[in-house]
Image: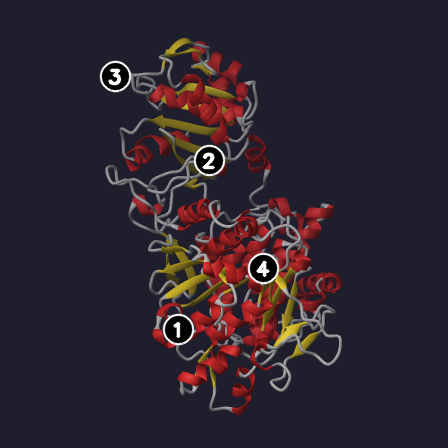
């Protein structure tokens, strides 16, 4: 049972009762009876929420009952002053109660010292009557200072709204580092107090024990993967600072280019390998650098050589497993510039876990930023915002042994999120990605190493990429020829070649202005002839360029199996303008259009165009004719809120969440898990789409829902 379920269980038991028969834990050292949990107006009072929270902690097996005490008193400096009362405290061992009673009854100072040493978490409760910044300043800070532990968890629980804090060696901050902006002058902004914490972030007793037993100055050579920090969200200020340091380091040695990028990719592969080895075998980590190992001006210095030797050994071991990424060593350890960049990368990432930070966390921030920084604009690459990828994966619903393809995969986020959202039910050997930028394919492979076991088929297809190069069932890449495969006749081969077809295609291809096949060039015109839409296009459009979006639309349709489905992001003009009427007419003759989702303007910062997601599936030809005659229904939505604003800060690309506010209180709205809800329409739209599918033809319902 998790915290949310325990909370619901408590509500089912007690929300209609006026009193709690007996306190769940001791109150000021004693169990109490007949505790009122309603106010004079029969509304739930602060006591109700106190016991709701404590009950949920225990029922969810986060903390043992006997380690928790309610209404714990600590003396102030002046003996005549009233003592400080903390609503609830969690202790490290059960001996706290005996010490507490001795202190309260006999004013025993040694007993008080023992209570303070054993206190590991302090909790304050309220019920909608004070602003969080007032409570933080007047109570939470004071409560966090009472225990003598090196680490103390602070909790503020206000009628379901949860805020978590921590105090490490005297410094108070939010428990989730992403909510810390400690250089701000405003309390609300400093600690992001308007944003709640989800219940799943509440650490359990064993997690806090690890913090208490942890030497915060633990030698880097003694670290294991479980000692590393998990990054909960991509807005972690520490991580953004680390990325900025790496980019500046590359700049300083004139390696803010492809060579620096390749070094970074290989080092990240080494880190992933190192962490996975530690996780599997319990070995100590080797991806680190001590202060004395940092290069200054002598590559032959003994400590510098120790660092280099350690990384070289790690590389030789990882190379056996990660053949594609590490086939050629891009790090020249005799090159001072390479050593400086490697030193900075290791320094910045050595305290963070890549493999334990999940799909929406550290690896996305790293991949998004570095793929953006080192992309080749001439190849018209741009990356899809993660909330949109997540939405499309939820709509297409890849699962089980299905094959999934992205013909212009970039960093392979469509594939990685397909794998993650399927809860590993997908076989990553059935995930296929293609890109015409070799560096992107390396980053895609790195992405898939984090999410699966690295068996995804990521293929570098140069020049025109997957437009004219297809994977055959035997694993070879075949090049289409306009002499034999014109107008989509791609299955016509003089030998036994059979092209691979896919169950699902998910893609956001290059499209729009400046992203076209140039029909004035012989080679590009020749490639265009492979597509039926080219021949339809030139009948009415003497223009010199064929939009790549149209090309990849046909590409997707032709590469899905009968019964397969696709989701593609295209310019809104292709979905609506008269210029592309012929393309839409062609499309409805090939597939059953399932859904159209219009996205708000500039949701893709690199394109600056309005976009539409087109979703469809491919029935048999006879079945499609019958569906067209039946005037089938299409699910259409105009999505206006995507839940984020894309920004670039200190050269880091970040997605600032837009939170939904309560119109009366102006507080962020929280869901059943205590998490602040973003202002987005994807979640509702996915559910509406699934509800709509229930009333469509059997094939559609099976393809998208089962």
Which residue is under mark 3? 41
Q: Element at badge 3?
A: loop
Q: Is residue 246 above or below residue 16?
A: below
Residue at point 57%, 33% (across, down): 209
Q: Nearer the viewer, residue 678 or 698?
A: 698
**Closer to the N terminus: mark 1 or mark 4?**
4
Q: Element at badge 2?
A: helix
Alpha carbon separation for disc pair 4 and 3: 59 Å
Which residue is under mark 1? 581
Foreground mark, 3 or 2, reads 3
Compared across the picture, whether 379 is left or right of 71 comes to: right
Q: Element at badge 1?
A: helix
Q: Residues within 10 Å of mark 2 (few under 14, many from 20)?
A: some
Which residue is under mark 2? 199
Foreground mark, 3 or 1, reads 1
Q: Is residue 182 above or below residue 348?
A: above
Alpha carbon separation for disc pair 2 and 4: 39 Å
- Residue 461 image position (x, y, % from top left): 62, 76
Alpha carbon separation for disc pair 1 and 2: 50 Å
- Report if the CB atoms under discs 3 and 1 are less than 8 Å apart: no
Compared across the picture, whether 465 is left or right of 681 comes to: right
Foreground mark, 4 or 3, reads 4
**Closer to the N terminus: mark 3 or mark 2?**
3
Q: Is residue 185 above or below residue 46?
A: below
Q: Element at badge 4?
A: strand
Which residue is under mark 4? 564
């Amino acid at each position: 049972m998790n915290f949310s379920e325990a909370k619901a269980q408590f509500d089912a038991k007690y929300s209609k009762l006026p009193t709690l028969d007996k306190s769940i834990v001791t109150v000021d050292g004693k169990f109490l009876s007949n505790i009122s949990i309603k106010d004079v107006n029969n509304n739930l009072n602060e006591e109700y929420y106190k016991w709701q929270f404590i009950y949920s902690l225990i029922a969810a097996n986060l903390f043992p009952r006997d380690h928790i005490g309610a209404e714990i008193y600590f003396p102030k400096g002046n003996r005549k002053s009233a003592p400080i009362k903390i609503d609830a405290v969690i202790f490290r061992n059960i001996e706290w109660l005996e010490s507490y009673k001795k202190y309260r009854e006999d004013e025993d100072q040694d007993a008080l010292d023992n209570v303070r040493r054993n206190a590991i978490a302090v909790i304050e409760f309220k019920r909608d009557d004070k602003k969080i910044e007032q409570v933080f300043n007047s109570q939470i800070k004071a409560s966090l200072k009472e225990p003598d532990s090196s680490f103390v968890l602070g909790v503020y629980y206000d009628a379901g709204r949860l805020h978590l804090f921590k105090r490490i060696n005297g410094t108070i901050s939010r428990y989730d580092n992403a909510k810390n902006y400690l250089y701000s002058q405003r309390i609300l902004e400093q600690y992001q107090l308007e944003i709640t914490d989800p219940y799943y972030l509440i650490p359990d007793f064993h997690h806090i024990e690890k913090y208490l037993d942890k030497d915060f100055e633990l030698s880097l050579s003694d670290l294991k993967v479980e000692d590393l920090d998990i990054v909960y969200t991509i807005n972690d200020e520490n991580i953004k600072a680390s990325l900025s340091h790496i980019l500046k380091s590359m700049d300083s040695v004139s390696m803010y280019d492809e060579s620096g990028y390749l070094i970074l990719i290989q080092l990240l592969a080494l880190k992933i390998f190192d962490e996975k080895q530690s996780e599997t075998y319990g070995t100590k980590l080797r991806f680190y650098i001590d202060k004395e190992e940092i290069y200054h001006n002598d590559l032959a210095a003994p400590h510098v050589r120790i660092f280099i030797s350690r990384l070289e050994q790690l590389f030789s071991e990882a190379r056996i497993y990660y053949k594609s990424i590490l086939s050629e060593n891009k790090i020249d350890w005799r090159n001072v510039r390479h050593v400086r960049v490697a030193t900075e990368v290791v320094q910045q990432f050595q305290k963070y876990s890549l493999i334990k930070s999940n799909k929406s966390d550290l690896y996305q921030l790293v991949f998004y930023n570095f793929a953006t920084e080192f992309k080749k604009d001439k190849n018209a690459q741009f990356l899809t915002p993660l909330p949109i990828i997540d939405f499309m994966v939820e709509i297409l619903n890849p699962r089980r042994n299905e094959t999934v393809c992205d013909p212009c995969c970039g960093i392979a986020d469509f594939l990685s999120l397909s794998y993650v959202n399927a809860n590993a039910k997908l076989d990553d050997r059935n995930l296929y990605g293609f890109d015409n930028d070799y560096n992107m394919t390396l980053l895609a492979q790195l992405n898939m190493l984090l999410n699966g076991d690295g068996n995804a088929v990521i293929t570098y297809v140069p020049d025109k990429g997957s437009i004219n190069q297809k994977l055959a069932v035997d694993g070879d890449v075949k090049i289409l020829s306009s002499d034999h495969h014109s107008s989509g006749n791609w299955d016509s081969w003089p030998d036994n070649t059979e092209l691979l077809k896919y169950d699902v295609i998910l893609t956001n291809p290059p499209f729009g202005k400046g992203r076209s096949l140039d029909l004035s060039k012989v080679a590009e015109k020749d490639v265009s002839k492979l597509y039926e839409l080219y021949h339809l296009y030139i009948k009415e459009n003497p223009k010199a360029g064929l939009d790549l979006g149209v090309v990849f639309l046909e590409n997707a349709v032709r590469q899905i199996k009968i019964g397969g489905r696709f989701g593609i992001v295209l310019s809104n003009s292709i979905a609506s303008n008269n210029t592309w009427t012929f393309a839409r007419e062609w499309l409805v003759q090939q597939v059953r259009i399932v859904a159209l989702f219009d996205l708000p303007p500039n949701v893709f910062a690199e394109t600056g165009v309005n976009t539409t997601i087109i979703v469809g599936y491919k029935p048999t030809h006879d079945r499609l004719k019958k569906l067209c005659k039946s005037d089938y229904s299409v699910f259409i939505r105009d999505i206006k809120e995507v839940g984020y604003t894309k920004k670039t800060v200190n050269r880091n690309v970040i997605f600032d969440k837009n939170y939904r506010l309560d119109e009366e209180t102006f507080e962020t709205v929280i869901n059943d898990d205590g998490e602040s809800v973003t202002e987005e329409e994807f979640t509702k739209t996915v559910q509406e789409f699934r509800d709509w599918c229930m009333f469509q033809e059997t094939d559609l319902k099976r393809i998208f829902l089962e």
